[in-house]
Image (cartoon, coloured by chain):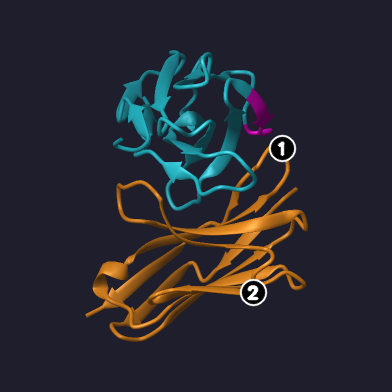
Chain colours: A cyan, B orange
Amino acid sequence: DTGVSQDPRHKITKRGQNVTFRCDPISEHNRLYWYRQTLGQGPEFLTYFQNEAQLEKSRLLSDRFSAERPKGSFSTLEIQRTEQGDSAMYLCASSLSGGNQPQHFGDGTRLSIL
Amino acid sequence: GENVEQHPSTLSVQEGDSAVIKCTYSDSASNYFPWYKQELGKRPQLIIDIRSNVGEKKDQRIAVTLNKTAKHFSLHITETQPEDSAVYFCAAIPDTGGFKTIFGAGTRLFVKA
């Protein structure tokens, strides 16, 4: 197992376009988290899945953002009608369940809005 | 809302010296406190963590201390090496259904050879 993988690594798009990112967690991990990280800041929590159920969403996650994990394995994060302020690194992490568990991060998808 | 403050934002030490990074959290429900190291352009890597029922934990040159009463925890790196240079993030997580992780803003550590 190679750890958490994210695709694509980089995405450049024009303002107003929709983008979708994919995250494949470590295979035995049933928790999955999405974060956003801007330059010089720590990761900001966006949302969390336990298997296929989305159990927590940050107030940062506006109506333009939607995340899914339909079969409890990979997850997608979609941003509709992108804005300049959406430019950031989008990180995915996964962990085992059973109380608090160490989260393992992917390399992230860097989104640049032109 | 929940908040984690991290200090200092930048830390420069001479190789072989110790480095200390401090974090303060606001959510009293937090009971798990991991530390991550992030090198430029790479993913955050977990380096050590501590749970609220423990006051101190050590792993070779790295140690973490926790004071739940004061709501602060610290990372100690001894005998620093140039490869320790990176950004370090602390985080606080409650043991509730959402496991909403709150990260500090990070400390950029420079270790001079």
Few, some or many C-alpha atoms within 10 Å of disc 2 (few <14, some 14-19, many ≥20)? few
For the residues labelled 1 and 2, the Cα–Cα distance comes to 24 Å
Residue kind at label 2, given as amino acid type: Gly
The residue tagged 2 is B55
Tag 2 secondary structure: loop
Residue A57 drawn in magenta: yes
Q: Residue shown at 60%/29% (left/top)?
A: A50
Q: What residue lies at 49% left-to-right and 18% top-to-bottom?
A: A78
**Labels 1 and 2 within one chain:** yes
Q: Residue B110 at what x, y percent from top left? A: 33, 72
Foreground of the two, B108 or A2: A2
Label 1 sits on a secondary structure element that is loop
Q: Which of A86/A47 is in front?
A: A47
User: Residue B57 placed where, x, y %?
Assistant: 54, 72
Q: Quadrant of residue A92?
A: top left
> Which range is magenta?
A54-60
Q: Which mark is residue B97?
A: 1
The amino acid type of the residue labelled 1 equals Gly
Q: From this view, report whether residue A16 is shown above or below residue A101.
A: above
10 Å neighbourhood of mark 1: few (<14), some, or many (≥20)?
A: few
| Mark sitting earlier along the chain (1/2) | 2
Name the side, left or right, on which B99 lies relative to A103: right
